Amino acid sequence: MALSFAHDIRPLFRDQDIACMTPYGFDLSQLSDVRMNAALIYERLAEKTMPQDGAWSDENIAKFKQWLDDGMAE
Ligand code: HEM
């Protein structure tokens, strides 16, 4: 089954990620904002410069990439 935002991706964003990034122009809790900024978000996750206080596991980074490549399902 394809990965979905609600089930697979949204839970990866913590409250502090959402709070930190909203002033930078996107709300990580909102599908529309994550879709619009997905390439930029993936770039930061993959280079491990975001989240600032600790990179995601390679497994979760790969999960985000797969969700992106599969068309960013709701
Ligand atoms: C999964 C979590 C996070 C993601 C996906 C994320 C993503 C991003 C992205 C894509 C940018 C570049 C924005 C742009 O160029 O317009 C950025 C910048 C920034 N983020 Fe995050 N972020 C996350 C968590 C955090 C947290 C927890 C903090 C604070 C502790 C933070 C603080 C910042 C700051 C200060 C910048 C601007 C400076 C810079 O570009 O390095 N972010 N983030």
Image (spheres, rainbow, N blue to C red):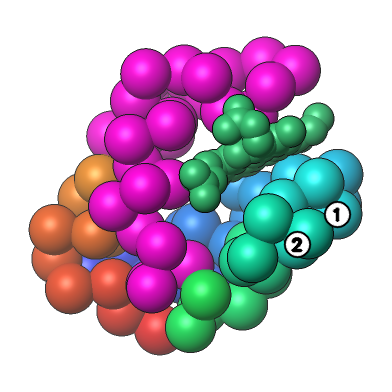
Q: Nearer the viewer, residue 55 or 47?
A: 47
| Residue 13 painted magenta | no
Mark 2 in CB contact with mark 1 (< 8 angstroms)? yes
- Give left or right: position of 69 versus 20: left
The magenta span reads 34-63
Query: Which residue reaches farthest front?
Result: 24
Query: Which amino acid is tagged 2?
Result: Thr
**Tag 1 secondary structure:** helix
Q: Specify the quarter for ligand 1.
A: top right
Location of mark 2 (residue): 22
Is the residue 1 above or below the residue 65 in the image? Answer: below
**The N terminus sits in image quarter:** bottom left
**Tag 2 secondary structure:** helix
Q: Nearer the viewer, residue 72 or 50?
A: 50
Q: CA distance from mark 2 to mark 1?
A: 6 Å
**The C terminus sits in image quarter:** bottom left
- Give left or right: position of 68 versus 30: left
Is the residue 59 above or below the residue 43 in the image? Answer: above
Picture coordinates of residue 26, whole percent (x, y)? 62, 66
Q: Residue at x 13, y 58 (%)?
A: 69
